[in-house]
Amino acid sequence: MKFGKIDTPEVVDFVLPPDNKDNKLILEKSKKGKPAIYIGCAKWNKSDLKNFYPKGTKDELAYYSTQFNSIELNATFYNNFPLETIDSWHTKTPEGFRFFPKLHQGISHWKRLKDAEQPTSVYLDHISHLEEKLGMLFLQMPDNFGPKNWEILRDYLEDWPSGFPLALELRHTGWYDSSWDTSQLYAQLEKKNITHIITDTAGRRDLLHMRLTTPTAFIRYNGANVDSDYSRLDDWMDRLKLWVEEGIDNIFFFVHQNHEEASPLLSAYLIEKVNKEFGTDIKIPHNPNALKQTGLF
């Protein structure tokens, strides 16, 4: 994920903001069971995840899904895939694997949610072929989609069908800089049970809001290919522990990198900590330490 990339990450204050005071109220609505935890990368293609696939790997998704329990599916933002392709994704991945697809850019960036009923319906008809392996969809709005567009966003979310779990990522600073009454946004997300994505990237600390709107944390973490990427994950573990103690239902954590080939390495580091802390048995990606030889860290 190139979004938020800067050339001097060493000067950034990566300390996580305090937890939002309203999160306890949100987590009181949780089921109070053991949380479902999914950790993955943003892409599975070999050209991005260099050195991850064994020599001779013919089907990248099939292998990826033996190493991770989920994928943040950015490909659906750029392409409308035929049903045969989506069906094949379902077929070639194991039971328990989950996809977290991004809505197509035609909905979010071209139409900007205006008169978007038809493309949304087509998208959902296709993506529903993932069946039980569909984790949560996410809607990412462009940087220039700010609070002046609130009514458009509100109306789109109001019509969102409840059968498709949805998360929302906003990128205009006006949503979070206190220049606008965010209580309207949070009320709508809570009403419609829509998860508020937390984006952690070096160049956009203004988006690191820490406000949950459902008992689900959907975190898009963008490393900077520097050693501090690991200590940042340590800080995230402290926050996740807090939320688990307060009863969170789901943790969806997706690791991006400016150089994506390092994503499995960071993911493995986080998964190992999660397994130790929460007693989970999430598979740790095979031989990610081989990436240390690439000179990325």
Image (cartoon, helix red, strand yellow):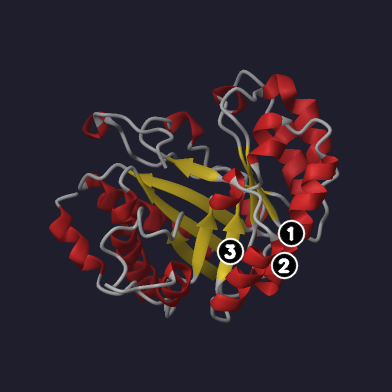
Looking at the image, is mark 1 or mark 3 earlier in the sequence? 3
Q: Nearer the viewer, residue 205 or 8?
A: 8
269 versus 232 height, above or below: below
Numbered badge on residue 91: none
How would you rate the neighbour count of disc 3 (Cα within 10 Å): few for under 14, some for 14-19, many for 20 or more?
A: many
The image quarter containing residue 286 is bottom left
Q: Secondary structure at mark 1?
A: helix
Asked whether the residues under the numbered discs 1 and 2 touch, taking CB atoms below 8 Å apart as contact, a structural biologist would say yes
Q: Which residue is under mark 1? A: 126
Is the N terminus in the top left, top right, bottom left or bottom right quadrant?
top left
Q: Quadrant of residue 56?
A: bottom left
- Residue 129's disc number: 2
**Residue at (61%, 77%) from the top-left corner?**
91
- Residue position marked by numbered label 3 in the rendering: 99
Q: Nearer the viewer, mark 1 or mark 3?
A: 1
Left or right of residue 220: residue 130: right
Above or below residue 159? Residue 288 is: below
Q: Is residue 236 above or below residue 90?
A: above
Q: Is residue 36 above or below residue 190?
A: below
Q: Position of residue 272 (x, y in %)?
A: 32, 71
Residue 29 seen in this snapshot: no
Query: In which quarter of the view is residue 150 placed?
Result: top right
Compared across the picture, whether 261 is left or right of 86 comes to left
Dot 1 alpha-carbon crowd within 10 angstroms: few under 14, some 14 to 19, many 20 or more: some
**Relative horizontal placement of residue 47, taking residue 126 as reference (left or right):** left
Q: Are marks 1 and 3 in contact (CB under 8 Å)?
A: no
Q: Amino acid at mark 3?
A: Phe
Q: Residue 135's x, y, as percent? A: 63, 64
- The kind of residue tagged 2 is His
Q: Residue at x 19, y 49 (%)?
A: 296
Q: Residue at x 14, y 51 (%)?
A: 295
